[in-house]
Amino acid sequence: MTVHQRTRTDDPHYIRLHESDNVAIVVNSFGLPPGTQFSDGLVLKEFVPQGHKVALTDLADGAPIRRYGEVIGYAIGDIPQGSWVEESKVRMPSPPALDSLELGTRVPAPLPPLEGYTFEGYRNPDGSVGTKNILAISTSVQCVAGTLDFAVRRIKEELLPKYPNVDDVVPLTHACGCGVAINAPQAVIPIRTLQSLARHPNFGGEVMIVGLGCEKLQPERLLPDDKQGVVRLQDDSFHGFGDMIEAIMEMAEARLKVLHARKRETVPASELVIGLQCGGSDAFSGVTANPALGFAADLLVRAGATVMFSEVTEVRDAIHLLTPRAVNEDVARALVREMAWYDDYLAQGQADRSANPSPGNKKGGLANVVEKALGSVAKSGSSAISGVLAPGERVKERGLIFAATPASDFVCGTLQLASGMTLQVFTTGRGTPYGLSAAPVIKVATRTELAERWRDLIDVNAGRIATGDATIEEVGWEIFHPNPIRLSA
Ligand code: CA
């Protein structure tokens, strides 16, 4: 990576990521005007906004445009050196063909183990370790959501203060459970997600279910093993709304008592299950925050933790960089399976990959999904990929795992929680006030402007990488030592 470092804050500078790149992105806040000269002599022919691409050489009509050392598109018309390479001048390439990928051909050697890192967690009887102590109340059907929300407000006001060791009460409400063919093959994902969520390490094995009674998805299917713990609103013994609320509160209090007795203990960092995600991405995501997160992911894998990356939508166009890293052919084929599912899904919806990126992503400098994908997969670091999860499946292996989810932030977050994620790291460039109620989220800004404007939302400022004030490695270590789950040696 070549960072044309400034000597003063307002000196013009750009970032070129790979020696074969013929475009670079402008780093200066608010962009740079025509006539601007960089320290290497390059002169801007026109205004280039911050995060957008400038042509480093003359690009003839149809010439490949290279960023990250990969082709992100082809020039539409001649693009002279020093011009703004904006979205309308870039023709999107075809996605990598799924039938000619290298499968497990270049498996990275394991990096030296990082020993002795620990955190304070809640150990569960099933061997999992939580980062929070939460009473979760799940639901078998959408019809009970309003009643449960009312009950949860009262539980929080009247019961939770009596059990200070419990962090929160979280209702798991959703739009499923009835009205569709509940056992149809395509319905497997929401049901599996609810089943997996009920076993989440932060819920301590004490999830209870609120059901209606007549729904297709019977509540027992969501409970772990033979646990008792269902309140059915149609129960014959209930005379009206007051009885229902009382029954929910009574069961909730019994579980709060058990959860209150949980104690944090020092456990090895290898017990952490970390999810990686980006949202509201810009052209800096793949330059600052995501590579720093990739470095942190490698550190976490070295410490023996489980690290999940996701977002099929943004992995599809970089899949040729990932299948060679799979530990074996089976894992590589599982990656291909998830990409093929996405291709079929787009075909069924008569959509194509240009549905992504979003208008805001484009405003931030991302021309197309290829450029977005190359920046997105930087989160995965450089370790071997040791497993693949279908959406909502619970994680079994340690190391770097691909958990198939959409890129949509809260859907991805929910599915990573279902897979057992106990801590998420979320990178953002455009900015999103994202959070999850069931696990802590460390938020990393790609740009200093955002980190300063959203001081109370951003935990780590990776924008310092673009301005030459910190290295990818330094910010990676900062992410590895996060609040509130501070890893200590
Ligand atoms: Ca996302």
Image (spheres, helix red, strand yellow):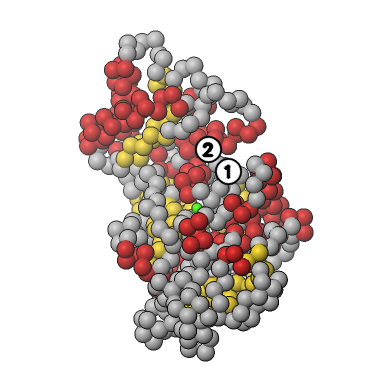
Indicate if the residue with disc 2 has its beta carbon within 8 Å of ligand 1.
Answer: no
Q: Residues within 10 Å of mark 1 (few under 14, many from 20)?
A: many
Q: Residue at x 35, y 50 (%)?
A: 265
Place of residue 420 in the rendered image (x, y in percent of width and height, measured from the top left): 49, 45
Place of residue 53 in the rendered image (x, y in percent of width and height, measured from the top left): 54, 72
Q: Which residue is the site of mark 2?
A: 193
SS for tag 1?
A: loop
Which residue ends up furthest to the right in the rendered image?
100
Q: Residue at x 31, y 28 (%)?
A: 150
The reply to whether discs 1 and 2 touch (Cβ–Cβ < 8 Å) is yes
Residue 78 is tagged as none
Question: What amino acid is found at the position of numbered circle 1 in the picture?
Answer: Pro
Q: Earlier in the sequence, mark 1 or mark 2?
A: 2
SS for tag 2?
A: helix
Q: Residue at x 52, y 61 (%)?
A: 362
Quarter occupied by residue 391: top right
In this picture, residue 314 sits left or right of residue 410: right
Question: What amino acid is found at the position of numbered circle 2 in the picture?
Answer: Thr
The residues bearing labels 1 and 2 have C-alpha atoms spaced at a distance of 8 Å
- Nearer to me, 95 or 131: 95
In this picture, residue 91 sits left or right of residue 196: right
- Nearer to me, 482 or 444: 444
In this picture, residue 384 sits left or right of residue 132: right
* Vertical position of residue 105 compared to residue 250: above or below: below
Q: Which residue is the site of mark 1?
A: 391
